[in-house]
Amino acid sequence: MEKIIFSIPLKNGKTAKIYQGAFGSGEHVTTKECIKLLETMELTGKTLLDVGCGTGILGICASLLGAGSVTGYDVSFDACRTAKECNELNGISNNHIVCGFETAINGRFDIIFANIYLDILTSISDFIYGSLNDGGHLVVSGVPIEEHYDIRKHYIKYGLEVLDLRIHEDYCTVLFRK
């Protein structure tokens, strides 16, 4: 079966290429908003964590936009295999893919993206908070709009500040700073 390649043009003139072997083709509104936020951030030399990386799209885009080091993890073996193959498709060597749960991740990051389900965002919030550098940015997406207040309230109790809230048709994306 031939793989369908999706091309995602970035503001710096580069293009990320992804094939659909897991979640994250770049066509879903939550992924598009995450990429838009990535494009507004100063990524040079920064460390980034992609929670639930799927195809690796956010890590690939971050790498192409200048991130120093990216780590993506997913619990799905198929997603991790796809992410590694998409890294190769883009010539990316600094997007490190880990297959496993958050317990497989060590270190702290300047930026964390988590475009995943609300129940996961809340169940691993201690891990996310503990993995985010002071002054770092957290982007959560994939949250149904009717639950945007709950996710903001949940992370505000950790002391995070809401910098941006983007409401889409069915979902929201929230940018926090620690």
Image (tube, grey):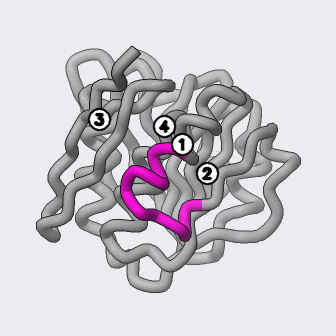
Distance (Cα) linking label 3 and label 4: 10 Å
For label 3, count other residues whose C-alpha is less than 10 Å away and answer few (under 14), some (14-19) or many (20+): many
Q: Which residue is mark 3?
A: 26
Q: Amino acid at mark 3?
A: Gly
Residue positioned 46% across, 64% down in the render: 92
Residues rendered magenta in the picture: 85-95
Counting residues from the N terminus, which is met first, the one under dot 4 or under dot 2?
Answer: 4
Circles 3 and 4, Cβ within 8 Å, touching? The answer is no
Q: Which residue is at the front of the view, 28 or 5?
A: 5
Q: Nearer the viewer, mark 4 or mark 2?
A: 4
Q: Which residue is mark 1?
A: 83
Q: Which residue is mark 4?
A: 55
Q: Amino acid at mark 4?
A: Thr
Distance (Cα) linking label 4 and label 1: 4 Å
Label at residue 72: 2
Counting residues from the N terminus, which is met first, the one under dot 4 or under dot 1?
Answer: 4
Q: Amino acid at mark 1?
A: Ala
In the rendering, at what x and y percent does residue 120 appear? Answer: 67, 28
Distance (Cα) linking label 1 and label 3: 13 Å
Distance (Cα) linking label 2 and label 3: 16 Å
- 74 lies above or below 94: above
Q: Which residue is at the front of the view, 82 or 54?
A: 82
For the N terminus, the quadrant is top left
Distance (Cα) linking label 2 and label 1: 9 Å
In the rendering, at what x and y percent does residue 137 appear? Answer: 49, 64
Counting residues from the N terminus, which is met first, the one under dot 3 or under dot 4?
Answer: 3
For label 4, count other residues whose C-alpha is less than 10 Å away and answer few (under 14), some (14-19) or many (20+): many
**Image quadrant where residue 168 sits:** top left
